[in-house]
Each structure stands twice: as structure tokens, then as C-alpha cells.
Amino acid sequence: MMKQQYLKIMGMVLALSACTKTGDGFLSPTMQYSVTTFTVKKGQIASSNSLVSDGSTIPLTVKWTHIYDEKGNIVDTMFTHKYTVGVWTSGYNAATDSNYALIMAKRSTEELPPLIVNETSGVIQANSGTLNLPAGTYTMDLEVSNAAGKQELKHAMTIVLQEGKTIETSPETGNYSLGRLNANTAGAPPNSGIFNNTNNPFVMETITRLADTPNTLLVKIQDRFGTPFNPKKGEWKKRPASGLNPVPPYLQNLEYYSPDTYEARDEGMFIRFPLTPFPINSLGNGYNMYYILPTKFVHIDSTSSWSANTAPGTYYKGTADSHYLGVFKDDLYDFSLRIPLRIQVPGSYEITLKMLDVTHR
């Protein structure tokens, strides 16, 4: 009788131990991602969440085996093609890596596929190579192995490739903000707002991606008739910070973010940038660049207030517009503008901003 009870207890112990997930050499059949949809904007850097091992013995080795399009077709070759991608060769330090040369000293390029699965965590990493892939929804199979063996996780992740902005301005990064500053006063004078919201009716934006390389940006500002303001001649310049003898003396601007590659050219402000997203980190107040058009170079229209809910594509029409009230007296005000700007995809770019409520003097 005692022997039978002993055997029964031992049987229960063995049965329980066979179900234990934390024993040596266990590979869970229920491993999965906690979030099973990974959305990627084409050309932008992104990472998925990690694979939940569900008690499986580590280390794990994870790799993808097949990727399918929306019709269920295997499209593996599309995701094994390699592209030239910028990579870090040593750690980035935000406090000291403050210009193009210092950052590029820690950068190199490699030929990489557009999606890479981290072989230990299962994190899916997207790089700029995704710019070359068709937008759409894809599913990925994984193979996971450890000391206990291997198994395939069918349709482990849904990957949504979306078209996105190569440069994010308004509304993703902020709003174009326009105003009037009292001219010829010490420090940054009070700002009288003209418009600060999405769908700014006074700013007509054109972004052109000229080439895949090099990583450059040229920003142009024009008046309503397309006449350019020349930063090399001081026709648009950095906006002073508030107060007397402020440190730094100006609000954030392209030159602060790229001090060693910045050029004030006849046609606009130019920089080389080392990587995307750029700027990497904000110097304060988001990713906004602050400038003025000095009063001696500009006539400014006086307008009545616009609704904050201005519809997209609604633009100021000058003297024919119902908001037009006349022109401010010359030599009283500088024209201030805040440009929201963050580059998300490598390449060579040109941004033209037409200010519809000003005329070049």
C-alpha cells in the first residue's frame, strides 16, 4: 500500500515537472510578439518590440524564414536585397558629438537588407533601405532555436510599410509661426503673432528630394512673387533670443545644429547633415528653426485674424483677400518666422518657403 502511494506521488511529480517551462532545454510553443503589427514609414529608422520567449531557455537564436505580401506570395528576395545604409561604428555622445565632423568620425556605411531581425531578442529593425520597397502589408515567419531544438512561428509579425514624409515639417514637427517684431530694439522685442497653427495660410511649402546622396539641405525663403531673400546679404538671419546679453544669443537655427557645414548662400541657407533623423536631438523647444526678415528688406501686409481651423490648401490671396487690411508702415517691424523641420530620410533636399503676406523691398 505504501509502495503504491509512493509510486503515485512520484508519477504526479514527474508529470508536473514535464509541464514546467523553466527547466533546462525548454522551447515554448507559444512564443509571440506582444504587439504583432509593426508599422514602418518607408526610409525611416524604426524598431519593433522584442519577441516574448514565454519561459524558453536562453540564449535564443531568431531569424526570419519567409515574408509574404498581401496576396500570400513569398517575396523573400525583395527583403534580402542589400542597400547602402549608414551605421554607427562607436557610441554617440549627445554632449560632445555636436557637429558634422565629430559625428561622421563615428559613422560608416554597410550593405544591409532593409529589415534585420536581431538574432537574440527578435527585435525587427528597419533602416533607410525600406525606401526602396513597395508600400503594403507583409507577414513574416520566424525560426527560433535554442538548446531544446527549433520551431517555426508562422505569421509571427505583420509589417505595414507606409509612405511617409522624407522631411517632417507641419504638422508632424510643429507649426509654421509668423509674427512681427519691433525693429531696432535691444534684445528680442515683443512678438505680435500673425498666425501660429496648422495649415498656415501665409506659407506655401515646396519640398524637393533631389538625389539619394549626399545628405544636404538648402532652405530658400521667397516673397509672394517668388523673389528670394538672400541670407548671404543679411536679408534673412537668425532670430535674437530674449533679454539683454542672452546665452546663447539666438534662438535655435540650422547653423546651431550644423555649425561646421552651414553656409549662408545667395539662394538660401545650406547644410550638410550626417544622418537621419536630423536633428538627432532638440536644442530646446522641439525641432523649430527661428529667423527674421529684417525690416529694411520687407513690406508686411496687415491682415485680420484667421480662424485656427483654416482648411488645408487655403492660402492668402494678397490684396484680393477678404483678410487684407493694408500694409504696415515700413521700418517699424521685422518679420519673424518659425520653421518646424526634421529630416527623416537620407538624401539631398531643397525646401522653398513662399511667404504670401510679405513683399521684398
Image (cartoon, grey):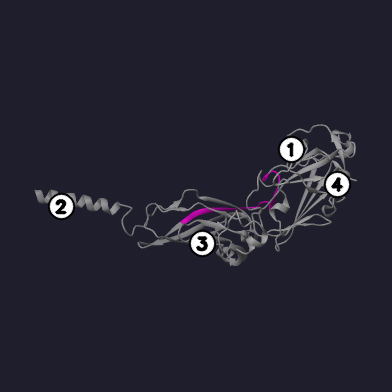
Which of disc 4 and disc 1 is earlier in sequence? Answer: 1
Looking at the image, residue 331 lies above or below residue 30: above
Q: Is residue 81 visible?
A: no
Which residue appears at 81% of the width and 40% of the height?
A: 315
Question: Mark number for residue 66?
Answer: 3
Q: Residue at x 46, y 54 (%)?
A: 51
Of residues 6 and 288, the one nearer the viewer is 288
Q: Secondary structure at mark 3?
A: strand
Asked which secondary structure carries label 4, the reply is loop
Depth-wise, is mark 1 or mark 3 nearer the camera?
Answer: 1
Q: Is residue 171 left or right of residue 329?
A: left
Residue at the disc numbered 1 = 196
Q: Which residue is mark 2?
A: 7
Q: Which residue is mark 4?
A: 223
Q: Percent x, y for residue 260?
A: 71, 59
Q: Which residues are magenta?
A: 154-173
In depth, the one of 145 and 281 nearer the eye is 281
Mark 4 or mark 2: which comes first in sequence? 2
Q: Amino acid at mark 2?
A: Leu
Q: Are the residues at dot 1 and dot 3 in contact (C-beta closer than 8 Å)?
A: no
